[in-house]
Image: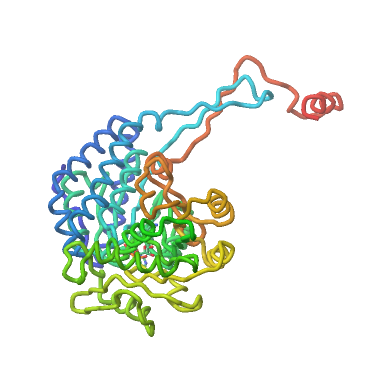
Amino acid sequence: MTQRKRTIRSKKETKSAVARLLEGQRAFFDGGVTRDVDARLRQLTALRRAIVAGEREILAALAADLRKPAYEAYLAEIVFLYHEIDFTMKHLGRWAKPRRAGAPSILRPSENFVVPEPYGAALIIGPWNYPFQLTIAPLVGAIAAGNTAILKPSELAPATAKVIADLIGRTFDPEFVAVVTGGVDATTALLRERFDHIFFTGGTAVGRIIMEAAAKHLTPVTLELGGKSPTIVLADADIETAARKIAWGKFINAGQTCLAPDYVLVDERVRTRFVDALGRAIGNFYGDDPQASPDYARIITTRHFARLRGLMGPHAPRIGGRTDERDRYIAPTVIENVPLDDPLMREEIFGPLLPVLSVGSLDEALGIVRSMSKPLALYLFTGDRAAERRVIRETSSGAVCVNDVVIHVSNYRLPFGGVGESGMGAYHGQYSFEAFSHLKPVMKRTRLFDMPLRYPPYRGSAMNIVRRIFG
Ligand code: NAD
């Protein structure tokens, strides 16, 4: 490990330092070290060890940034990464091997295979809501696939950004993995450079900026964005369990979860029972005064606090509604009878406000879902297989989870990503490896003979032969 400074702060410094950093990473990549799968495995081991050693400072930073409860932070930001790294290390040998492919008879004899090759220098831009996990999980894929990486953690979670910079600085040479901290200026300076892949997690608006910048260099992007994830509760659902799971998924991290159920469409026949059950779940989780609960997080900034209070607007919440600006506290809040053209139903909420709308039928629910942008996830509570099949077939979303919320993100055998406005590309497990790899086809032809048929001058007899083969 070198003593070189690994984080870059001042604006002037950022511009030229970023270019130098990237140059160093390119030279390192060209040296070929990352092509070796054993070297990648060693780096993943080093990353895992660094996280184990840094657990306490990671949890403290998350508490400082978001007042994130240690239990939530440990599961969602640390254990998640252990699983991801362990799964990747177990299977990397197989994923990285050339994969045999067949060939149509006209191309035989030939050997055909697909060789995964690293893109080169990757840029990973992280958000603030799960600021450790969502910056480091893509790095696991980048390392596994043999790339170098520059990480740009979110400036809105400054304590976690510092921990990431320290931890990565202690573990890797900056020619291999480096951290650039800072805000929009730092990201803008990074985006001026030509990377070989950009992996961005954040909002749709910034996603567009990233893609525009990437287009200048024709750099491929993975965009992990947000959206309004709908939750449909049908009359036959186990209402008590559905309400408990939805309350958990909505109010974990004070609603600042990209996959949180954004709003609920509940069959009007069970609406009252459902909302009562939500109230019970919230009470059981956080007590009578959630502000006093050690298990309830805070809103990241006063700007987001003001945005959420604005969204609450004129509504009289059925549950919750209390706010405290000094503490950036917003109670778990349930709002009924929200019209579809209300701001609460037009933009991603990303906070602890849950609109519950009643619907008369599954058709009505599907109509509402389809009238909006494609969400990151869609949740359905029912035991009705036909309804389940209809929802899966007739809607488009990053993922569907039936009879639960959010939890599908932890299955590293499933791709995680959005569609349409909720993003493009996917990661986790093998999908992360592939997100950071070019799957290069290789065809090797025989040297024993060369079919004359393809060469001019083209004769009528050749045409007849071709017709007989392909016609
Ligand atoms: P954001 O888009 O505001 O910021 C993300 C990153 O972009 C930060 O590192 C920030 O510094 C940078 N950035 C901000 N403005 C920029 C600009 N003008 N130019 C260049 N870079 C800029 O997102 P956020 O507020 O950190 O996170 C919230 C959003 O992210 C929500 O929409 C949420 O749904 C989404 N999200 C998605 C996922 C997912 O996995 N799909 C996960 C978490 C969050």
The location of residue 429, given as percent across then percent down, is 37, 41
Name which quarter of the figure residue 148 lies in.
Answer: top left
Name which quarter of the figure residue 34 lies in.
Answer: top left
- Residue sitting nearer the eye, 162 or 193: 162
In the picture provided, is 423 more to the left or to the right than 391?
left
Q: Residue at x 22, y 74 (%)?
A: 328
Q: Is residue 355 above or below residue 405?
A: below
- Residue sitting nearer the eye, 11 or 426: 426
Q: Residue at x 38, y 68 (%)?
A: 275
Residue at the extreme bottom of the image, as rendered:
314
In the picture provided, is 182 more to the left or to the right than 241?
left
Q: Residue at x 48, y 50 (%)?
A: 383
Quadrant of ligand 1 in image: bottom left
The location of residue 294, given as percent across then percent down, is 16, 63
The location of residue 120, given as percent across then percent down, is 38, 44
Total marks shown come to 0
Q: Residue at x 38, y 78 (%)?
A: 311
- Residue sitting nearer the eye, 289 or 215: 289
Q: Say whether residue 424 is visible.
A: no
Q: Is residue 454 above or below residue 376?
A: above
Q: Where the N terminus falls, by quadrant? A: top left
The location of residue 321, given as percent across then percent down, is 30, 77
Residue at the extreme top of the image, as rendered:
448
Q: Is residue 9 above or below residue 48?
A: below
Residue at the extreme right of the image, as rendered:
460
Q: Say whether residue 430 is visible.
A: yes
